Amino acid sequence: MRITRWSTQPLGSLPVRPAAAVTPIAVGDYLCSERELYRVEQIGSEHAVIEECRTGELIDARIADLRSLGRVNRS
């Protein structure tokens, strides 16, 4: 989620910051929505196969859509 704040400064006076790097999604990563947990099984150029951990169902999903899911940190 990106939060933008309203600014009264002209655009030319705002500091320029580099775009945040997107962490690539890799096989074995765990992703989550509010109610589901997924494991990345395979990665292609634009799509990935993920497993829904609760049911074992395999899902073909666009990588762009997966970036909106949360990441589960592993130790």
Image (spheres, rainbow, N blue to C red):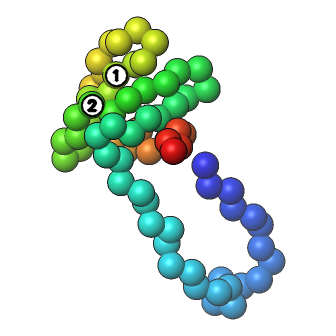
Q: Earlier in the sequence, mark 2 or mark 1?
A: 2
Question: In the image, 46: left or right of 3?
Answer: left
In the rendered image, which residue does mark 2 sit on? 41
Q: Are marks 2 and 1 in contact (CB under 8 Å)?
A: yes
Q: Which mark is residue 32?
A: none
What kind of residue is marked 2?
Glu
Q: Is residue 18 visible?
A: yes
Question: In the image, 11: left or right of 7?
Answer: left
Q: Which mark is residue 51?
A: 1
Q: Up-down: is 12 above or below 71?
A: below
What kind of residue is marked 1?
Glu
Gap in angstroms between the C-alphas marked 2 and 1: 7 Å
Element type at mark 2: strand
Q: Is residue 62 visible?
A: no
The location of residue 60, given as percent across then percent down, is: 27, 26
Question: In the image, 61: left or right of 5?
Answer: left
Q: Up-down: is 7 above or below 68?
A: below
Residue beneath the point at 55% across and 29% down = 33
The location of residue 19, given as percent across then percent down, is: 49, 72
Closer to the camera, 53 or 13?
Answer: 53
Q: Which residue extends farthest top?
A: 55
